[in-house]
Image (cartoon, helix red, strand yellow):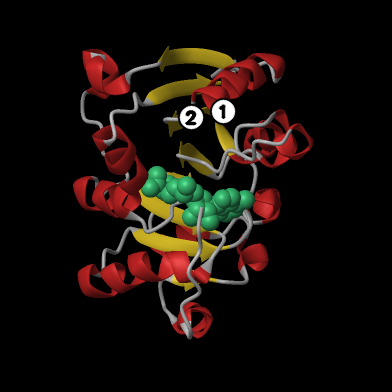
Amino acid sequence: MRLRNVPGAREVMIENQYVYTEPEGMRGTWKEVFGNENPIHIEIGMGKGRFISTLAQMHPAINYIGIEKYSSVLLRAVEKQDELQLPNLRFIRMDAEAIGEVFGEGEVDQIYLNFSDPWPKDRHAKRRLTSRQFLERYDGILRKDGKVEFKTDNRALFEFSLEEVKEAGWNLDAHTFDLHHEESMNEGNVMTEYEQRFSEMGNPICKLIASRDFKK
Ligand code: SAM
């Protein structure tokens, strides 16, 4: 993703009440942040935040945390949240590689990955947010019956992700290579910024839902 540096964005993040820039000490305390026992859903690589902000407005009984590496990208979402002041929405500015240090075991109920960076070179495969290395990190923080939902228009990244889900021993609950024409999976779909842009260009959108075996 092309990144425009926005002067002052870093300082805004440090001071804003909805953003955590040093989240390592927060492990196991996220329910206290929201002041309730509601489930916690996270989006990793949330960009400008339209998806997670829309979900937070639609589902007040779910807590949402958007994770984004760059202050300049996160800025738009934070400005919108300053206006909306949704009590069930927070942001973390961090590289998701450290996600296991920020959430405790089973602290997260659902993980969304939308239009994640493809990292096309083979030697960078482990940086892809659907790689087996990331699935292992998610395994450490996701509730046993929690799900990972992934959308992309990048067919190569999607096929890689299908393989990784299998290799990591996760279950592929559902998948489609053309979400917007698959009625059952598209029902209630909330579009992301990238999803809108790429589908308007005529690109089909792929989606998968993955989970692990669990015993109640
Ligand atoms: N999810 C948004 C959407 O669908 O419109 C944005 C997609 S954009 C292509 C990917 C975003 O993920 C970028 O904002 C990027 O900075 C962020 N990102 C990529 N790798 C990340 C990582 N390891 N940790 C946190 N954010 C990451």
**Residue at point 36% right, 26% down?**
205
* Labels 1 & 2 near each other (Cβ < 8 A): yes
Residue 137 visible in image: yes
Task: Pick whichever, 82 or 203, lies toward us.
Answer: 203
How many numbered marks are there?
A: 2
Mark 1–mark 2 distance (CA, rounded to whole Å) = 5 Å
Label 1, residues with CA under 10 Å away: few <14, some 14-19, many ≥20: many
Q: Quadrant of residue 187?
A: top left
In the drawing, what numbered circle is on residue 154? 2
Task: Pick whichever, 196 or 62, lies toward us.
Answer: 196
Q: Quadrant of residue 69?
A: bottom right
Residue 62 visible in image: no
Q: Is residue 213 left or right of residue 67?
A: right
**Residue at point 26% right, 64% down?**
86
Task: Pick whichever, 205 or 77, lies toward us.
Answer: 205
**145 up-or-down from 58: above or below:** above
Q: Which residue is mark 1?
A: 157
**Amino acid type at image mark 1:** Leu
**Residue at point 43% right, 44% down?**
41
Label 2, residues with CA under 10 Å away: few <14, some 14-19, many ≥20: some
Assign the C terminus to one quadrant of the image.
top right
Q: Is residue 110 left or right of residue 85?
A: right
**57 up-or-down from 192: above or below:** below
Give the x, y percent position of residue 171: 56, 14
The local secondary structure at tag 1 comes to helix
**Amino acid type at image mark 2:** Asn
Q: Is residue 138 left or right of residue 84?
A: right
The local secondary structure at tag 2 comes to loop
**Residue at point 48% right, 85% down?**
8
**17 up-or-down from 181: above or below:** below
